[in-house]
Image: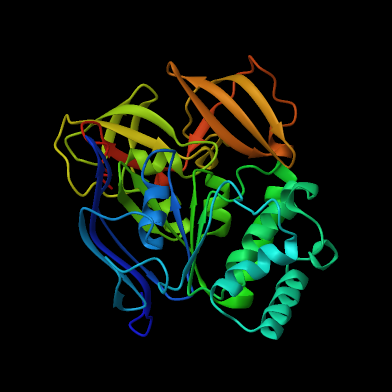
Amino acid sequence: MGRSEKHALRLAGITKSYGNVRALNNLTFDVAEGRFFVLFGPSSVGKTTTLRTIAGLVATDAGRLEIMGRDVTTAPIAGRGVSMVFQSFALYPHLTVYENFAYPLREEKVGREEIDRRVKETAAMLKLSHRLERKPNTLSGGEQQRVALGRSLIRRPKVLLLDEPLTNLDAKLRHDMRAELKRLHRQFGMTIVYATPDELEALSMGEEIAVMREGAIVQRGTPDELYDSPVDTYVAGKIGSPHMNMVKATLGADLASLDTPLGRIVSGRKVMTGAAGEAAFIGIRPSDLRPAATGEAAIASRVHLIEPLGDVTVVSVEAGGETLRMVLPEQSATGMRPGDEVPIAIDLAKIHIFRAASGQAMT
């Protein structure tokens, strides 16, 4: 991170328990101003609690929270400069779209003319100008989502918190709203913290992603960093679709070769820590497997399943008692049939090696 970058958010040692359940466990991270930052992980890892803590809806047991350099750990919700959009759109059903937009500004005692100007400007930006006199229950799911967004944006928050905001939309609308959110982020340059369990959302939207597990951050980085250098099997299994192939292995005496059900494999990546004979896993991305060229060192395999996905095809093969998936360009998979014998090659420079005992990366 560049030195000139200011932090919009800083969480240090944030801990929160509900009875015996620890929702946040010494959670520590910062977000640079203007960044689109994604909290990613399955349900119940602490994403929503993190957002609610930043918003001031949850009082922490320990730790410190700063927004724009100011300690707001125990500050009231109002005045934090933060706005949150929930998974359920939480609109006022009895108010029109116009009134839903105007409500937070009236609460802040903004003048009538300024309210009217900002409502119309926000509606135009979200393509809702023709819906201002309608009630929320007469709108489509996508329109309701845009109203919920607009009600947060109209306050001009320094930090916008989005808690799985696209979960209730169909696939086409989710795609459209992802693009819309990226556009709004560019237009406003505001800091966005976005929580999602959806890998596609995380990778397509996040400039920086924090992978969460059990109330803490396991790894953070750009989508490319998480894909190329996962710190453990948990991150490796969460980033990349189809998921990484995992094959049991034993580390050789030279700490470079590995004995596996696929035969002996010599890694193109240096093993930094490890002992001869140690149990390990080799991680192979489906895109780093391919049919072997004639005369190339190859592993015997048999085609098990073929899944065409448009311009690419996922081919599952069985080799050495393991099922491996490879992603091939559509034309490379043409003519393959279940039962066919296909010798395969691995890109050894790209394999990952993980310690079996802890799941930590060894390369």
Snapshot quadrant of residue 151: bottom right
Q: Residue at x 41, y 56 (%)?
A: 51
Between 275 and 227, the one lying in front of the other is 227
**Residue 292 sits above or below residue 98 on the image:** above
Report the side of 329 relative to 215 (left or right): right
**Residue 208 sits above or below residue 258 on the image:** below
Q: Residue lying farthest left?
A: 275
Snapshot quadrant of residue 220: bottom left
Report the side of 7 relative to 200 (left or right): left
Between 134 and 31, the one lying in front of the other is 134
Q: Residue at x 33, y 53 (%)?
A: 219
Quadrant placement of the N terminus:
bottom left
Measuring from the top left, give residue 46's x and y in whole percent.
36, 45
Measuring from the top left, give residue 90's x and y in whole percent.
59, 51
Report the side of 266 relative to 142 (left or right): left
Q: Residue at x 27, y 49 (%)?
A: 270
